[in-house]
Image (cartoon, rainbow, N blue to C red):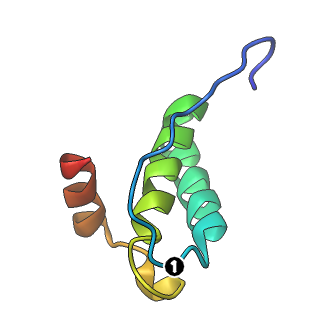
Amino acid sequence: MTGDTLHQVAPTSVKAVDTSGAGDAFIGCFAHALVKTGDIPAAMAQASAYAACSVTGRGTQRSYPDAETFQRFLNVN
């Protein structure tokens, strides 16, 4: 929410393998994107996609994609 505006981000549909760490993936990506761009809705969308990508692998930190892997994921989804 910003002021009187409510922003909703549609989730990215994936076949989840392990949802452990998805919240941490989301908030870490959100913070990074927000600091980089200052755009809350765009940061939310990127973080949602990053968390979706992270649940396609097993584990927590090891399932977090690097920049190249995340970019490939975005290009496919």
Q: Is 62 left, or right, of 75 in this rendering?
A: right
| Quadrant of the image containing the N terminus | top right
Residue shown at 53% from the left, 58% from the top: 29
> Mark 1 Cα within 10 Å, few/some/many (few <14, many 20+)?
some
Q: In the image, what residue type sits under mark 1? A: Asp
Residue extending farthest top: 4
On the rendered structure, is 48 left or right of 65? right
* Residue 62 higher or lower than 1, as above or below: below
Q: Residue at x 61, y 79 (%)?
A: 20
Q: Which residue is mark 1?
A: 18
Residue at (49%, 45%) from the top-left corner? 36
Q: Nearer the viewer, residue 68 or 75?
A: 75
Given residues 63 and 66, the one toward you in this image is 63
Q: Residue at x 80, y 16 (%)?
A: 3
> Residue 72 location in percent, x, y?
19, 59
Residue 21 in percent (x, y) is at 61, 76
Q: Residue 9 lies in what quarter of the image?
A: top right
